[in-house]
Amino acid sequence: MPEYEFVDVHLPRGVTRKDAARQLTDHAEYGHWELYRLTLLRDGSRKVRLRRRIIRQVRATW
């Protein structure tokens, strides 16, 4: 089963949908993050959880 690391991003109420999409696209392109969960809070802000796969390498023993 793959292992993931997570990061939470908080987007305040005043952030437009276009700006939010741009920020998340930057995270995806440059940090290799993918959207895991997006929650719209009562105050209008968004809580975004991003994840990326942890790749473990086995040490080569020669």
Image (tube, rainbow, N blue to C red):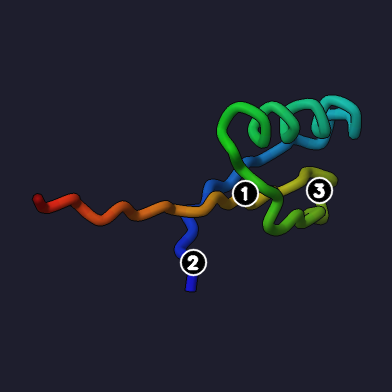
Report the mark closest to the observer, 2 or 3: 2
Q: Residue furthest front?
A: 62
Label 1, label 2: how far apart the Cα atoms are: 15 Å
- Residue 61 in percent (x, y) is at 11, 53
Label 3: few (<14), some or many (≥20) within 10 Å? Answer: few
Task: Give whichever of discs 3 and 1 has the lower sequence position.
Answer: 3
Secondary structure state at the residue bearing disc 1: strand
Secondary structure state at the residue bearing disc 3: loop
Q: Residue at x 84, y 45 (%)?
A: 44
Residue 39's image quarter?
A: bottom right
Report the mark closest to the observer, 3 or 1: 1
- Residue 55 in percent (x, y) is at 41, 52
| Residue 50: assigned label | 1
Label 2: few (<14), some or many (≥20) within 10 Å? Answer: few
Q: Residue at x 59, y 38 (%)?
A: 32
State whether residue 17 is above or below residue 59: above
User: For mark 2, what is the residue?
Assistant: 2
Q: Residue at x 62, y 41 (%)?
A: 9
User: Which amino acid is tagged 3?
Assistant: Asp
> Circles 3 and 1: CB distance less than 8 Å?
no
In the drawing, does residue 26 fall left or right of residue 40?
left
18 or 10: nearer the viewer? 18
Label 1: few (<14), some or many (≥20) within 10 Å? Answer: many
Secondary structure state at the residue bearing disc 2: loop
In the drawing, does residue 21 fall left or right of residue 59?
right
22 or 3: nearer the viewer? 3
State whether residue 32 is above or below residue 1: above
In the drawing, does residue 25 fall left or right of residue 19?
left
